[in-house]
Image (cartoon, rainbow, N blue to C red):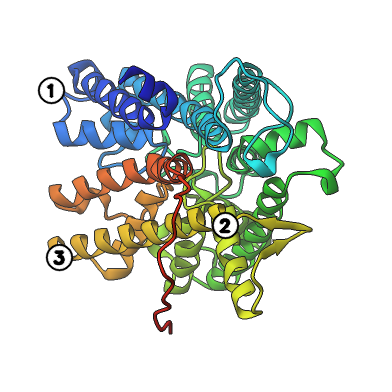
Amino acid sequence: MKSSVLRHPVRVVPLLFLATIAIGTVLLLLPVSRAGPGSASLLDAVFTATSAVAVTGLATVDTATYWSFFGQAVILLLLQIGGFGIMTGAVVLGLVAGRDFRLRDRLATEVERNRLLGSSARSVLYLAFTVTLVVEAGIALVLILRLRLAHGESWGQAVWNGVFHSVSAFNNAGFSTYSDSVMGFQADFWILGPIMFAVVLSSLGFPVIQELRNRPFAFRSWSLHSKITFLGTLFLLAAGFVGVLAAEWSNPATLGPMPWSAKTLNAAFHSVMPRTAGFNSLNVGDFRVETLGINYVLMFIGGGSAGTAGGIKITTVFLLLLIVWAEIRGQQDTNVMGRRVGSRVERQALAVGVLAGVLIAVATLVLVSISHMPMQDILFEAISAFSTVGLSTGITADLPPAGQVVLIVLMYLGRVGTITVATALALQHNQKRYRYPEENPIVG
């Protein structure tokens, strides 16, 4: 048993996340975690702990008023453990999938083969820790000074709110110590800007961050993974910005009354947040249907692999599109940027995409059958939970207990499922010594 676990640590990761959620639930159930009398309900504690460890941000209660300082500190700790664990765990699992190795082994230099750039596993984890610490500290400092000097908060309030939002942003969580998230800062670039920067950077994924550190101006020599993730991120940010700006420009409940500068700032903010951070500077419940549709797509795709972002990941979607394009052109191989994509990676992308779609569809049907919420809101909630985004149209707390349990399952599977499924497929690769006779069913 022990040797099997050591050989396949992918089997341990889901259990570690469950253990962390259980510990967080116990801490949140303590009376000292409640801002009011008594203790939290079991469902609220489990939901909050799962959302924090899965760095989602969905909540059944108001984080700012329901939880005490101790309770908020527990949530902050769970965010940090969940985010850092996800980043490093995904990196290590990707390395294991690429080649059997022990942590003391040296890593090869080819990222295309699911390996990182020339370093030991220990230095990989050290760099992840350093990046997390430095970025969170820098963002926190900017937010603290802005909250104190421009918004009149006391030093104590500014420090706590600044640190909390910095950690929440870098871990792509979206938990906020303000009841209206960051809607009170709609016109403040020095609040929304740093949060956007932290979200985008961490959503790139650790392999891309490492390339940016080692070879920031040598894009042509980057790995295929980093090229796809970086270019895909730029495209999605631009497309999301244009889409939200166009759809909400005249909406009197969102961007309509704002000057053009605030419109562009908030459109940019809401092109970043579906990349899986649940902060909102606008009321998502007031979005037009077309804006919700844009968010469906952005949330489902998510960010880069081996980072804190959720979704099925940019590389997965890009590979699926490449496979379709190659089939349309009658090409046997899937080629991109002078590289041929391996058949095993193609199958992994197909498996992750199909499993995610099926899971969201089933969960949506269940939620529709047990609640009376509008279909577009339920679908938004299901995608947000699975993709660990945390944005909501405002129905989370109004769902029946069974519906909230469905969201808990979605958040957990969405966070550990895509990583473990993809890696498990790589670990389970076995070449049989025989092949069955070929027969081709009719397709289409």
Which residue does the image show at 43% across and 57% down from the upper left?
351
Foreground label between 1 and 2? 2
Circle 2 sits on which residue? 343
Whole-Å distance between the Cαs marked 3 and 2? 39 Å
The image quadrant of residue 293 is bottom left
Identified by mark 2, the residue type is Ser
Q: In the image shown, does 268 or 356 lie closer to the viewer?
A: 356
Which residue does the image show at 26% across and 45% down from the upper left?
409
Circle 3 sits on which residue? 369
Please state, as top left, top right, bottom left or bottom right, where the N terminus lies in the image. top left
Foreground label between 3 and 2? 2
Q: In the image shown, does 275 or 98 lie closer to the viewer?
A: 98
Q: Residues within 10 Å of mark 2 (few under 14, many from 20)?
A: few
Numbered disc 3: secondary structure:
helix
Please say whether residue 376 is visible from this viewpoint: yes
Q: Is residue 164 above or below residue 98?
A: above
Numbered disc 2: secondary structure:
helix
Identified by mark 3, the residue type is Ser
Residue 158 at what x, y percent from top left? 53, 24
